[in-house]
Amino acid sequence: MPENATAQKAPLFVGDDLALDFINSEFGVGPAHHECFTDDHAVLAWLKLAGVLPHDTEASPEGLMELALQLRESAKCLLNAAKLGGEADASIVNHVLRAGRRSKELEWDSASNAFKVVRRRLQEDAASLLEPVAQAVVMLLTDAPLDLVRQCEAHDCTLMFHDRTKSHRRRWCSMAVCGNRMKVAAFRSRKKG
């Protein structure tokens, strides 16, 4: 593979938040750049792995990758603006929320012998599949303490995470991905000095 080519790699779910994991679907720098959304089927697979879609969902609507890439870029811009106290265009997120909203229906559940509310997708188009992600972006931007949304401290890592630890001292996307690697590098540096 050429040095600056984008490679497909398994997604890393280290963000402790659906919106951040969605943003993290593109990660790495330089020759280690990885893109999880290489086509409509790859986006569908990511949504299944994220638990947003049932595993038996098979049809990936046309334009899913294109809308997913737009939504991811919009989510990045909105998050950066929110953290820096700036303004950004929320039209893509709003489009997905409007076009993909689910209907609520009252349905009899014979198992529990009671009525229940069932949420149904209006259609199986790109916006309806991405609507839960857009909802997660909204929740992140409006309900999460943004000072606890951080980027991994490893010098070559672009992954973001929501620090939900009790002490709020999490430094790396994960111990397995970057934490151990950075601790080994620090140990070796101390040994040399």
Image: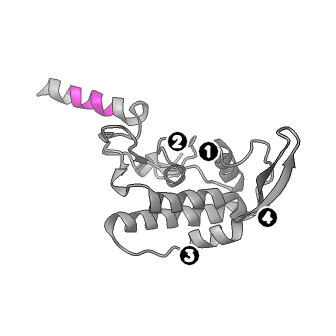
Task: List the residue tagged with mark 3.
Answer: 91
Name the residue carrying label 1.
50
Amino acid of disc 4: Leu
Vertical comparison of 4 with 91: above or below: above
In the visual, does 162 lie left or right of 113? Answer: left
Magenta-span inclusion, residue 187? yes
Q: Which residue is drawn at 35% across and 63% down?
A: 83
Q: Quick one: label 4, few (<14), some, or many (20+) residues within 10 Å? A: few
Q: What residue type is labelled 3?
A: Ser
Tell me the element at label 4: loop
Q: Quadrant of the C terminus?
A: top left
Indicate which disc residue 13 carries.
2
Element on which disc 3 rests: helix
Q: Give the range drawn in magenta.
A: 181-188
Q: Mark 4 points at which residue?
A: 122
Q: Sequence order check: which comes first, mark 1 or mark 2?
A: 2
- Give the number of the mark in front: 4 or 2: 4
- Horizontally, residue 37 falls left or right of residue 103, namely left
Q: How crowded is mark 3: few (under 14 residues within 10 Å), some or many (20 or more)?
A: few
Give the x, y percent position of residue 99.
70, 70
- Name the residue type under label 1: Ala
Query: In screen coordinates, is 12 left or right of 177?
Result: right
The CA distance from mark 1 to mark 2 is 8 Å
The single residue placed furthest to the front in the displayed view is 114
| Cα–Cα span, label 4 and label 1 | 21 Å
Percent coordinates x, y for residue 192 in the rendering: 14, 26
**Do residues under tags 1 and 2 come within 8 Å of each other at their CB atoms?**
yes
Q: Which color mode does the image show? A: one colour
Decide which of tag 3 and tag 4 comes sooner along the chain: 3
